[in-house]
Amino acid sequence: MTNILEEISKSCGCDTTYKPADFKVENDVRWCSGCGSYGILSQVQKILPELGVPKEKFVFISGIGCSGRFSYYVDTYGFHSIHGRPIAIASGLKLARPDLSVWVATGDGDCMSIGGNHMIHACRRNINLNVLMFNNEVYSLTKGQYSPTSQQGQVTKSSPLGVLEEPFVPAGLALGSGATMVGRGFDRDAAGMKNMFKAAHDHQGLSFIELYTNCVIFNDSAFDPFTSRQSRKEHTVNVEHGKPLVFGENDDKGIIMDGFKPKVVSLADGYSVSDFLVHDQHDVALAYIIAQMSYHNPELPRAMGILQSIVKPSYDQLTEAQIAHEQEAKGKPDVQKLLRGKDSWVVE
């Protein structure tokens, strides 16, 4: 099967082979040294040439915050929008131009707070967007206030005695809002990000990928239990469709279901890998259970990977079908007639 780039190459006899360097910009990338966003940017630039999409068909829309700079740092069309509104703007663009590959770069404050309504309704509508949410569990660009994903008890400049409320579980919120593809990864996991970004592009509908992003200035090492080489095997389980949930330093632990609750068991207790829960990314109920693991029971590992991927018609597909149906039944609309309305006057 040939992709659109190969078809263009054949028709014009020109070279449309892209390299990661084609998506890098000449201007300096100005995140803090050691910021996790560098790792995300690098993986995006690496997978774009592999997607078979003409460069002019990519659009990156960002909001406000450190992630808001993303649209400046990838050499495609882009839009640095206003606080909390990148998903709303991306939704409009996708409806007007369904031929574009539209990506959103947003942060935990931008997406979960001021942009929360846009996020949940875009998930509910299943608009064909790829949303990358950089989660550093703090407002970094405005110098370290707590965000909707900050941990209970976390001391920040706006919570000097510790955050009182419990945080959002972004993947759980996306699933509960109806997102058809939901994934979770982290900035140090190049292979994991690459797989999820490509899967998000291939997915028809809204894909929401939460990315743990280390903030070296205001929340350094916040995700170390789940992301550092020393501890992640004990605290993280990589989920893969059709494979059992195995984790632990020696791959000797797994998850079983005790009624409706996940439970950690060990090979040392007489269990075998065949007893472990097998991930099914098409199982909506299972995805929600896996997304919540470790938030309410610290003995359970944090799940990374594609938690859910199901097929439903996207909002833009339904919109196109609806318009086509109406035009077939009633003919193409007369815009001038619509503008004039039922009552109009001529001023002489």
Image: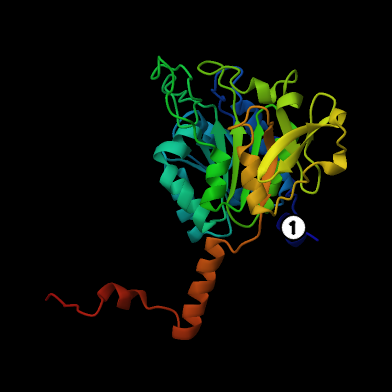
From the top left corner, tell me how far across and down residue 200 is, in percent. Answer: 65, 48
162 or 21, which is in the foreground? 162
Instruction: Give the class, few, some or many, for how many residues have Cα within 10 Å of label 1's Cα (few <14, many ≥20).
Output: few
Could you tell me which residue is drawn at 63 percent across and 57 percent down? 204
Residue 203: % across, % down: 66, 54
> Residue 174: image x %, image y %?
54, 46
**Residue 32 in sight:** yes
Percent across and percent down for residue 242 are 80, 49
Dividing the image into 4 quarters, which one contains the N terminus? bottom right
Type of the residue with mark 1? Asn
- Residue denoted by label 1: 3
As drawn, is 67 to the left or to the right of 287? left
Is residue 160 placed above or below 280 in the rendered structure? above
How is colour applied across the structure in the image?
A: rainbow
Q: Does 214 appear above or below 172?
A: above
Residue at the extreme left of the image, as rendered: 348
284 left or right, relative to 7:
left
**Is residue 18 in view from this perspective?**
no
Q: Nearer the viewer, residue 107 or 286?
A: 286
Vertical comparison of 171 with 141: above or below: below
* Quarter of the figure with residue 38: top right
Compared with residue 72, is residue 49 higher up or lower down, i.e. above or below? Answer: below
Task: Name the residue at 42% across, 42% down.
Answer: 115
Q: Quadrant of residue 302?
A: top right
The residue positioned 75% from the left and 49% from the top of the image is: 15
Image quarter of residue 229: top right
Query: Horizontal placement of 99 versus 161: left or right?
Result: right
Q: In screen coordinates, is 16 left or right of 251?
A: left
Label 1, secondary structure: give it. Answer: loop
